[in-house]
Amino acid sequence: MLGTKPDDKLYREIIRKQGFRRVESIREVKPWMNRILLWPRQRDTIDETMLAQQRAFREALDVIVKHGGWTVWVDECKYISEMLRLRTQLTYCLEQLRSINATVICGAQRPAWLPLSVLSSSSHAFLWKSVYRDDAKRLADIGGVDAKAITEELKTLGKHEFLYVHTRGTDARVLRSQVGR
């Protein structure tokens, strides 16, 4: 997992409950390790922090491409893509890594904030409630689905509900599910 925030309840929880190990560089990872949270510490300035994150994430993506077989969870995909200027590397991973048995999971607060390749290349999408027009436009980039129908369905979701969209195969499937509390 690529972690970006200065502090985050989710990050601390996956370390404590899911057995993730925090590292600041992919170079700290040993072959026997799994469940890695690459989470560079905050520096004295925003610029220094962003530079450290950019270097760490770029190096990690290169290692993932070199070795294959990884699943990488990109938290705050928009931030990593735009603010850290890693759109090219992220797009490469999204569009090319299936061939080396690697998976990229991208998270963002809203679909409209995701780079185009996240939705156009995805085989699975989990979508929570949204009523924004920009999100509806971006959802049209999911291959093989009726974006208008998905947008209308998203408006009706409750607090713990989500839509699961499977886009591989001849027909896309959309399922409404519920997250356990």
Image (tube, rainbow, N blue to C red):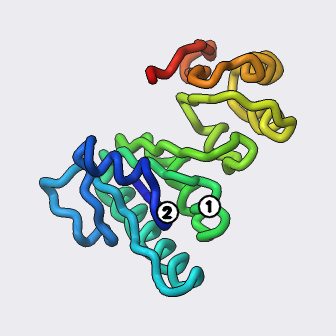
The quarter of the rendered structure image containing the C terminus is top left
Q: In the image, residue 123 lies at what x, y percent?
A: 54, 30
Q: Residue furthest left?
A: 32
Q: Residues within 10 Å of mark 2 (few under 14, many from 20)?
A: many
Q: Please name the residue shown 78% across and 23% down the image.
A: 151
Q: Who's the residue at 61% across and 46% down the image?
A: 108
Can the viewer see residue 147? yes
User: What secondary structure is found at the residue carrying circle 1?
Assistant: helix
Spatial CA distance of label 2 from label 1 is: 8 Å
Q: Are marks 2 and 1 in contact (CB under 8 Å)?
A: yes
Q: What residue is shown with label 1?
A: 79
If you read the primary sequence from the N terminus, does the residue marked by circle 2 or circle 1 appear first? 2
Query: Would you name the residue on which mark 2 appears?
Result: 4
Among the 4 quarters of the image, the one containing residue 160: top right
Which element is circle 2 on?
loop
Q: Is residue 165 visible?
A: no
* Coordinates of residue 38 in the picture (x, y in percent): 36, 62
In this view, 136 is above or below 91: above
Label 2 sits on what residue type?
Answer: Thr
Local crowd size for mark 1, using a 10 Å CA cut-off: few (<14), some (14–19), many (≥20):
some
Q: Residue at 68% across / 19% down in the picture?
A: 157
Q: Is residue 15 above or below residue 39?
A: above
Q: Is residue 107 left or right of residue 136?
A: left
Tell me what residue is drawn at x 54 percent, y 62 percent.
Answer: 89
- Whether residue 28 sits left or right of residue 39 in the image: it is left
Taking 25 as reference, is 88 above or below it?
above
